[in-house]
Image (cartoon, grey):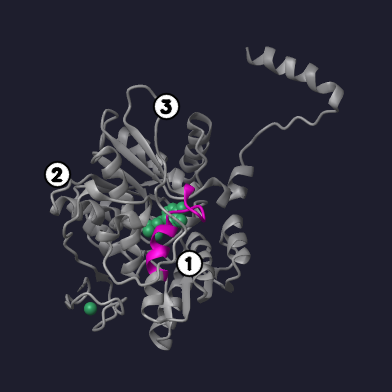
Amino acid sequence: MKCLNCGYETSLDQHNITCPKCGGILEIIIELKNFTFNNLKGRGVWRYKDAIPGNYTKIVSMNEGGTPLIKTKEEGKEIYYKFEGANPTGSFKDRGMTVAVSSALNTNYKVVVAASTGNTAASAAAYAARSGLKIFLVLPKGKVALGKLAQSILYGANIIEVNGSFDVAMNSVLKMYKDLGIVYPLNSFNPWRLEGQKTIAYEIAEEIGVPDSIIVPVGNAGNIYAIWKGFKELMENGSINKIPRMIGIQAEGASPIAKAIAKGSELPVFTNNPETIATAIRIGKPVNWIKAMKAIHNSNGTALCVSDNEIIEAQKELARKEGIGAEPASAAALAGYKKALHEGIINEKEKTVLILTGHALKDPDSMLRINTKIMSLNPEEIEKNVLGEINVNN
Ligand SMILES: *Cc1c(COP(=O)(O)O)cnc(C)c1O
Ligand SMILES: [Zn+2]
């Protein structure tokens, strides 16, 4: 394990979550031993257990991962949607949670905590329930999408709302972890969580080989790194022969990394008041920014930002052209793909995978805001009106 802040190095130890020396972000560096795609068993995250470091005497799993890789219906194009909304709680967070919660059990913690814009909360609550661990969630008051809050309530989590943005909630969790010492943090600064999330790369590589580019919505910036790490490990082990370009997408009002990349800077342009309708990526100070920069630079990738309008249009298009329902943050991947095409960063002949991070049902308000005409009719009026509509549309 290596600290990305002070450079401290230590052998692999599941008790380490942040740097024991300075509290910085730790990177887990592993070499795949005897890993090949040829002798894997089962499906989902734990199919790749030989690539997941740590000891797991008890695994808390709901068969997360193994999500559909859906090819676009457009002829002649190699665009794929990795639909993470198909995970047990409806987002990719489950991939990380199965590893992190199992790790918490193996290191004898009794209490887990997480700050969240919503999906980490829903996922952590479910896996905590299944493991029997007590859980505290710290949420930015009034800023969590309805479905995600409802899930956290359903799974029985202890919920704390704080005034302020996600970044304020995150600081409280970091502080709780450091001060109390007895609570296990489930946020993505926990590198063990990212070991589960990297299986997105393993699944893609196993199913379709290595794409030219991966487009990922970026909030706290753990996932873009986790996916890159997966590809990097596979390349170092000889299972694949290249790494896809990692293209991160942020919303205009919450784009510290995209702004830095745009001006050629290594340092993110943090904001105290992140704003976007894509609540899952409404983050002004991404805790994993160093990791994201590493993934982007090493893969010759980039980061772009998209407007809320572009996100809303992309969400609609994805649903109405492809039949795929994704929440706004996930639709940012499609909005970003279009921008990357437009700017000549990628071309439409390339094999590209868009990571659709969460399910549309997470955020019912975002769907209900779409203009539509609902016909309110008496039963005897229905046929006449349907005929009328059919004629109009023909
Ligand atoms: C968590 C989340 C993201 C952002 O992932 P990071 O690892 O924080 O960058 C994007 N979309 C959805 C739906 C999420 O739940
Ligand atoms: Zn350190």
- The CA span between labels 2 and 1 is 38 Å
Question: Does the residue at mark 2 contact the one at mark 1 (Cβ under 8 Å)?
Answer: no
On residue 166, which mark appears? 1
> What amino acid type should be assigned to the residue bearing mark 2?
Asn
* Circle 2 residue: 241
Q: Quadrant of the C terminus?
A: top right
- The CA span between labels 3 and 2 is 28 Å
> What amino acid type should be assigned to the residue bearing mark 3?
Lys
Residue 253 visible, this orientation? no
Q: Position of residue 123 (x, y in %)?
A: 49, 62
* Circle 3 residue: 73
> In the rendered view, would you say 242 is above or below 19?
above
Q: Relative to residue 282, is residue 37 drawn left or right?
A: left
Q: Position of residue 4 (x, y in %)?
A: 22, 70
- The CA span between labels 1 and 3 is 37 Å
Q: Position of residue 288 (x, y in %)?
A: 32, 65
Q: Position of residue 279 (x, y in %)?
A: 50, 56
On residue 259, which mark appears? none
Q: Work out whether mark 3 precedes mark 2 in sequence or the reverse, and give the earlier one.
A: 3
The residue nearer to you, when weighing 164 against 151, is 151
The label nearer to you, 2 versus 1, is: 2
Q: Which residues are magenta?
A: 86-101
Residue at figure coordinates x 33%, y 40% from the top left: 353
> What amino acid type should be assigned to the residue bearing mark 1?
Phe
What SS does tag 1 mark? helix
Q: Relative to residue 110, is residue 42 drawn left or right?
A: left
**What secondary structure is the magenta-colored segment mainly?**
helix
Q: Quadrant of residue 260?
A: bottom left
Residue at figure coordinates x 24%, y 68% from the top left: 27
Q: Work out whether mark 2 precedes mark 1 in sequence or the reverse, and give the earlier one.
A: 1
Q: Relative to residue 299, is residue 61 drawn left or right?
A: right
